[in-house]
Image (spheres, rainbow, N blue to C red):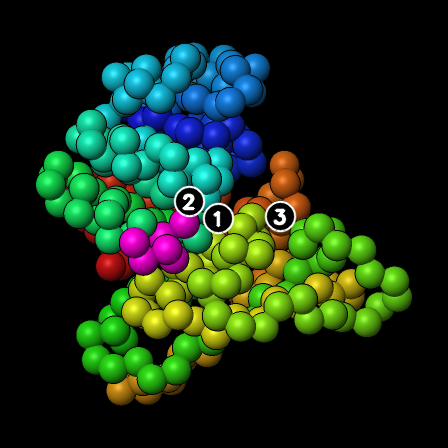
Amino acid sequence: MKIGIIGCGAIASALVDFVEKGKLDANLHCFYDLSPENAQKLASRIDAQVASDIDDLIEKSDLIMEAASQQAVISNIPYILEHKRDVVIMSVGALMDKEFHDRIQQLAKENKCKIYLPTGAITGIDTVNAANMGKITQVSLTTRKPPVSLGVHLDGEDEKVLFEGKASEAVKLFPKNINVSSTLSLASGIDVDVKIIADPKIKNNTHEIHLKGSFGELTTITSNVSSKNNPKTSALAAYSAASLLNKLNKTIQIGS
């Protein structure tokens, strides 16, 4: 299966690293970025191709992964689905717009395509999916990040709450930082309660999930190392993308 990638930043770079180390069993065949130089830099490392535009990327790919931005999802994913290509979406925040979510879901059905959403930088999504077979009564996410990861500067060591509200609003205000809230919302079927905290005392990006329902109760805490290429991205987000691509080729599937 030939995989095309939109966006040649931290996640795409990590995927190339995995290929070079023999940890990713996937054919990263073609790269596309608004900066052709960025695409060429990654493609040259694994003898891949560079697409001149989206049509060229579609022509050269069986599945296309978006690893760029919510805007890239909105601008390109419907068109790609219309051309009967499966997609992987990293910028899941775009799907919090219900009209857009329903539109691409319908396009995927009409064109017999799949839309894959990696678990990203949080744990427990398999459990959330399972819990949703019953009734989920409460779900919340508290995210703590170093100020640099959130693009803010704080004087002193006191933490600061930057946001408290619903995931649908959080993804608009912090489109590069809180895609995990969208994944959690889509898995649970609930617009998750989100708190975002800038904390100068921590080094890792931390996500704490509380879930209650007919199954019982779940609490998870994930403390993520930031990507070496982008402090706003957790390394685990790239790991989850690589894991999903590996899973597509495996005979035995573990997890939902």
Q: Is residue 112 left or right of residue 255?
A: left
Task: Verify whether residue 14 appears in magenta.
Answer: no
How many other residues sit within 10 Å of disc 2, few (<14), some (14-19) or many (≥20)? many
Q: Is residue 192 left or right of residue 159?
A: left
The answer to which quarter of the image holds residue 157 is: bottom right
Question: Percent position (x, y) of residue 135?
Answer: 25, 82
User: What separation in Å lies between label 3 and label 2 (alpha carbons)?
Assistant: 14 Å
Which of pointers 1 and 2 indicates the residue nearer the eye?
2
Q: Quadrant of the C terminus?
A: bottom left
Q: Are marks 1 and 2 in contact (CB under 8 Å)?
A: yes
Q: Examine the rendered structure and indicate whether residue 57 appears above or below residue 91.
A: above
Q: Nearer the viewer, residue 212 or 137?
A: 137
Q: Are marks 3 and 2 in contact (CB under 8 Å)?
A: no
User: What separation in Å lies between label 1 and label 3 (alpha carbons)?
Assistant: 11 Å
How many other residues sit within 10 Å of disc 3, few (<14), some (14-19) or many (≥20)? many
Specify start and end residues of the magenta stretch as a single range: 94-99
Mark identifier at residue 237: 1
Mark identifier at residue 152: none
Task: Look at mark 3 in the image and give the residue it sits on.
Answer: 232
Q: Three-letter amino acid code at disc 3? A: Lys
Task: Look at mark 2 in the image and give the residue it sits on.
Answer: 90
Question: Percent position (x, y) of residue 196?
Answer: 61, 67
The answer to which quarter of the image holds residue 229 is: top right
Q: Nearer the viewer, residue 166 or 59?
A: 166
